[in-house]
Image (cartoon, rainbow, N blue to C red):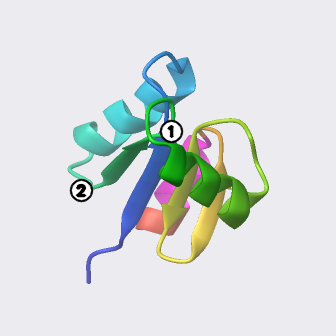
């Protein structure tokens, strides 16, 4: 069963790039929301997470704040 992976990011965020590279390197499909240009998604992530920083990653219903490779591996079963 595949997991629903969403990342809220900005183009200038180093840790966002690290997370997306991690997903690509491991063949994980994900949806990327650029909160720098999308005000609706920006409001959405603040409401969902209570966070103003990025990346905020959701794997199904589990939230990961920042790039925590060990937690991502655990949640993705890698």
Q: Earlier in the sequence, mark 2 or mark 1?
A: 2
Nearer mark to the viewer, of 2 and 1: 1
Residue range highlighted in magenta: 68-74
Frontmost residue, 24 versus 48: 48
The label on residue 29 is 2
Vertical arrangement, residue 31 with respect to residue 35, above or below: below
Residue 61, image x, y percentages: 56, 77
Vertical arrangement, residue 56 with respect to residue 19, above or below: below
Residue 78 visible somewhere in the drawing: no
Within 10 Å of the Cα at label 2, are there few (<14), some (14-19), or many (20+) other Cα atoms? some
Image quarter where the C terminus lies is bottom left
Residue 10, image x, y percentages: 49, 28
What residue lies at 36% left-to-right and 36% top-to-bottom?
Answer: 20
What residue lies at 26% left-to-right and 54% top-to-bottom?
Answer: 28
Side of 48 where 37 appears, left or right: left
SS state under label 2? loop
> Quarter-wise, where is residue 19 in the image?
top left
The label on residue 16 is none
SS state under label 1? loop
Vertical arrangement, residue 58 with respect to residue 20, above or below: below
**Which is the main secondary structure of the residues drawn in magenta?**
helix
Magenta includes 60? no
Q: Which residue is mark 1?
A: 35
Side of 8 where 78 appears, left or right: left
Vertical arrangement, residue 41 with respect to residue 3, above or below: above
Compute the Cα span from label 2 to label 1.
Answer: 19 Å
What residue lies at 40% left-to-right and 46% top-to-bottom?
Answer: 33
Frontmost residue, 24 versus 31: 31
Residue 37 visible somewhere in the drawing: yes
The outermost residue toward the bottom is 1
């Amino acid at each position: 069963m595949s997991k629903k992976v969403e990342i809220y990011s900005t183009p200038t965020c180093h840790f966002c790039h690290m997370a997306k590279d991690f997903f690509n390197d491991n063949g994980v499909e994900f949806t990327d929301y650029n909160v720098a240009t999308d005000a609706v998604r920006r409001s959405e992530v603040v409401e969902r997470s209570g966070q103003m920083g990025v990346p905020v990653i959701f794997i199904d219903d589990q939230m990961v704040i920042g790039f925590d490779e060990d937690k991502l591996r655990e949640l993705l079963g890698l």
